[in-house]
Amino acid sequence: MPVGLAGETTVGPGEDDPARAVLHSVFGFHAFRGPQAEIIAHVLEGGDALVLMPTGGGKSLCYQVPALVRPGVAVVVSPLIALMRDQVEALRQLGVRAAYLNSTVEWREAEAIEQAVAAGALDLLYVAPERLVTPRCLDLFDRSRLALFALDEAHCVSQWGHDFRPEYLQLSLLHERYPQVPRLALTATADHRTRADIIRQLRLEQARIFITSFDRPNITYRVTVKDNPRQQLLHFLRDRHPRDAGIVYCMSRNKVDDTAAWLAAQGRDALPYHAGLSSATRQAHQDRFLRADGLVMVATIAFGMGIDKPDVRFVAHLDLPKSLEAYYQETGRAGRDGAPADAWMAYGMADVVLVRQWLDASAAPDAHKQAERAKLEALLGYCETPRCRRQTLLGYFGETLAEPCGNCDTCLDRVDMWDASVAAQMALAAIYRTGERFGAGHLIDVLRGEAGEKVLRFGHDQIKTFGVGAERSKREWQGIYRQLIALGLVSVDLETHGFRLNDTAMPVMKGHKRLQLRRDPQAETTRALRGRRGRAEASTLSASPMAGDAALLFEVLRGVRAELAKEQGVPAYVIFHDSTLKEMVTKRPTDRATFATLTGVGSGKLERYADIFLTVIRSQSK
């Protein structure tokens, strides 16, 4: 089998291979990517598989292609209604017989879909896990010819995963009830413990495991120290993504609402999304995000899993995510089309304190608490690391990146480390001499010699550490305390929120152990962000870096696509991705034969759209 660039297996329409023929004729792709061909061949032979592949890596094709080659209906278990709807609509655009069963389908339509399944008139059926395990659904499958089961977002089955869904635990019955039907479990995020749990819970002990690189080289990772985070976010958006669609994650519903309203007041098209909104409002906001250009969705983690929008150019976090797995999953929603994208996070003292309090307050069993502690420690380590962020992130998933990536903040901007041993001694001594009862604000006042009412009331102007750190700013001391907490030298009392010394602090406080810390950069300014803009210019011009006639044609094609999408009530990218429109601009096809060679143009889309777009291209090329 011939191999193309970047691990792609080349494919042509005349090759005697059913999977390759489907890839080309239905999906309009000319090459398999990475291990897709091997995974598909394994499933076509009836084998089970666990597939770990990054967002945008082509997981869906690993079950969609064999679904169209193997006889029977392929059942795709999906946790999200939005994902089902969008994927089914995209498949129907390709001429694939697909449907979904979930709580939004009224009973007459559901009955018709069930009849189609039993009659063999569907290729793919998407179903929610809650419905799949019902007697009615299982009886339907008993009476139907089944091609395969695809268990999407498989990390939901694991209690160690970041999106645990109890209903997924029942899916082991598929192995027991349909042992001859191949099963694929697919996820973009799973550490070693989660992988082992997926295998055990789903009875995939005999499955082949396919793990591709977790690297998303098109994403620029950046973590900035909080200093008026809303303004920092606004500067980031104005200077890097003035017209781009993206997601801003916040921890609380109130913060989501406030941030969305504030961004709207600053002139950005922004909407909130969280579980406190009505289902109708959430659906309306999600539909707008999928269909509009340049919309910013401000959301809790209730939003995102299964969102297929390819042109999300940034994901920003105003609060820490739950874990590095969650962070990887959430940031992976940017740049699914492979074009440049940003993962930006603002992180500060309060975040570190909150993480440490989560650890101390957990009432989980010891084994689970230990695992959660490791996850949160890894998250803090990522935020504070002086080394390449991509190396740190990939290392967490057991992958080694030999050289620094050159596309994260620690690579692009030199990290300044300094010997903080003496400063750490002062900071720790201030905690000790004030009785391990006070938080950062009071301790910094003591260190800087600021004799305010509280300092005087407790007599802390009389202790040895009063004023010993006057030469450092409040911001510098905040950075020192943040890192001492992140490193585990200091903990935070759950009731008083006062800082306490851990055993690991003693060697540092007594001068027996030296300590290196990061020197926090100055707050990012608009000028500083603009100075870096040239390194990722494509991120701000996601529509097209074209100029002149090419740019004009691209915008005209986008307009035509938008009208078609509006008429059909689907997102624009379901018609064609931007990359296909750009290929139209580059190749300027004038006949169907040439149009059929475009990436993403299979027989279904050739029949539906070729004449429309060819007419536009011809008229603009005169």
Image (cartoon, rainbow, N blue to C red):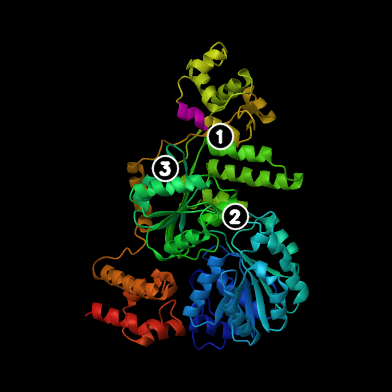
Q: What's the magenta bit mostly, secondary-structure-wise?
A: helix
Query: Is 74 on the left or on the right of 135, as rendered?
Result: left
Q: Nearer the viewer, residue 39 or 9?
A: 39
Q: Amino acid at mark 2?
A: Thr
- The amino acid marked with disc number 1 is Gln
Task: Kindly state the secondary structure of the residue where label 1 is placed.
Answer: helix
Residue 376 vertical position relative to residue 200 in the rendered view, above or below: above
Residue 163 visible within the image? yes
Task: Identify residue for label 2.
Answer: 400
Marked residue nearer the N-terminal end (3 or 1): 3
Q: Position of residue 491 (x, y in %)?
A: 64, 32
Say if 455 sits above or below 46 in the image.
above
Please indicate whether residue 173 sits to the left or right of residue 113 in the image: right
**Marks 3 & 2, CB-CB < 8 Å contact:** no
Q: Looking at the picture, does residue 607 appear above or below residue 463?
A: below
Which badge, 3 or 2, comes first in the chain's sequence? 3
Q: Secondary structure at mark 3?
A: helix
**Residue range highlighted in magenta:** 474-479
> What kind of residue is marked 3?
Arg
Task: State which quadrant residue 498 falls in.
Answer: top right
User: What residue is shown at x 40% (from left), y 79% (from top)?
Assistant: 598
The alpha-carbon separation of the residues under discs 1 and 2 comes to 26 Å
Number of residues whose C-alpha sits closer than 10 Å to that of mark 1, classed few (under 14), some (14–19) or many (20 or more): many
Residue 477 is a magenta residue:
yes
Query: In the orientation shown, which residue stands out farthest toward the left?
Result: 622
Which quadrant of the structure image shows residue 61?
A: bottom right
Mark 3 sits on what residue? 230
The residue that mark 1 highlights is 483
